[in-house]
Amino acid sequence: MELVDLSSIETVKTAIEGAIGIITLNRPKALNALDQPMCLAIDATLKAWAKDDRVAAVIIRGAGDRAFCAGGDVRAVREDGIAWKRGKSDGSMIRDFFRDEYRMNRRIRTFPKPYLALIDGITMGGGVGLSVHGTYRVATERTLLAMPETAIGLFPDVGASYVLPRLTGEVGIYLALTGGRLKAADALALGIATHAVPSGRLNELVAELVASIGQAEARAVIDRVLGCYMADAGRRELVDQRSIIDRCFGFDKVEDILAALDSDRGDFAAVTAAAIRTMSPTSLKLTLKQMRLGRTLDFDACLRMEYRLTQSVLAGHDFYEGVRTVLVDKDHAPKWYPGTLDAVDDSAVENHFRVPLQGDLSFPD
Ligand code: QUE
């Protein structure tokens, strides 16, 4: 097991100020992308703070001025996967990174004290998992939030199969398939954010919370202080499209969703259909099935389903191509395989949902 002291890694800084435990993601050059040691460190910290009487609440934020957290360190996962396919790695990162990330997501969801994420800047994929399962999500005018995994041959994970299908109407399915980006106003309207505060006031907000939270009544104090910092979140953009989204994304086949979008004359439908057509066909089909199933499953079962999917997706093709085209070569010219929705048959989709050879995700504590 782990021999390093997880409470003191450079990429995750922790401190207790007043009665608040503060976690700072500290990989600003990588937009605070999460790697496995960071997941383990956050998990261990929360496990300790859950029982620590000095800590009445937790704040998590990102270092630097661009991102809260851009996602998982998928570049590193891709490299380990390539080495594994060549017999040059035991593939432990593929098995263990997602396991440890999802266990951390569950730790946040079950954390017994108020947990507040300052989602200032880019908040995508794993960054959504670090925030949306907690008590409070504070957005700013710089928030840009999305689940963009279908663009990298993956699927929305970190509990997205629990959260997205429970959003109003078909908006969550739209976000999952297109990777659509939300700003503060839409995130707030959907309940993905709970508050909107000007980015320039976040340090002041943290200082005021540190000064005013005692051991008891942390929740009431946080509610009151956040209320004082609430700002106008700006214009909602997605509301205007709600009827199109609900009309077009209610189908159980991606082909039917595209047909519905194609039969709509508006710009939004055209732009949306074009965006979907750039995504991995396999990812699109997995994602839609995952979202429909997730609606019926509890949180742990959603994480188990997602873990199963990671193991089969990482044994396949499109994740490697997707990370290559978006993050390595940045040519944005993916060659998906299979290359069309037609060519992805139902049995191939079904197979992705099977229990992997190494077994299901478990939750030891
Ligand atoms: C989809 C994703 C991710 C992504 C882009 C996508 C993702 C992720 C990153 C990312 C971005 C900048 C970095 C970095 C990672 O981009 O999960 O290390 O510096 O982490 O289209 O899922």
Image: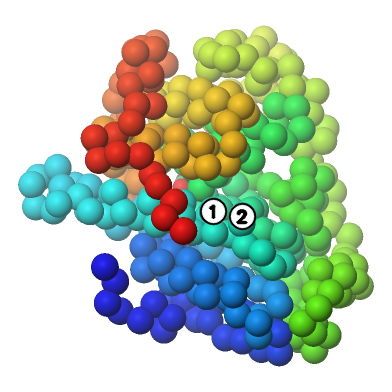
Give the quarter of the image for residue 119. bottom right
In the picture, the disc for residue 180 is none
Examine the rendering and report whether any part of residue 61 can be seen. Answer: no
Q: Where does the image place residue 19, in percent across and percent down from the top left?
A: 71, 85
Residue 206 drawn at (x, y percent): 74, 81
State if disc 2 and disc 1 touch (CB < 8 Å). Answer: yes
Return the residue found at the far left: 87
Please give the name of the residue rendered at 43% of the width and 30% of the height, measured from the top-left corner. Answer: 283
* Left-right relation of 130 to 247: left
Q: Find disc 1 in the rendering and name its residue.
A: 106
Q: Mark 2 — residue?
A: 109
**Image spot of residue 116 (x, y percent):** 69, 67
Residue type, numbered disc 1: Arg
Up the image or down, 8 lies above or below 291; here it is below
- In the picture, measured across the screen, residue 229 lies left or right of residue 121, that is right
Residue at x 46%, y 58% (from the top left corner): 365
* Mark 2 CB lies closer than 8 A to ligand 1: no
Q: Is residue 161 above or below residue 343?
A: below
Which amino acid type corresponds to the residue marked 2 in the rendered image?
Arg
Residue 356, horizontal then vertical, whole percent: 29, 34
Residue at the (59%, 47%) spot, across then down: 146
Q: Nearer the viewer, residue 232 or 12?
A: 12
Instruction: Check disc 1 and report its element: helix, strand or loop.
Output: helix
Q: Quadrant of residue 216?
A: bottom right
Q: Residues within 10 Å of mark 1 (few under 14, many from 20)?
A: many
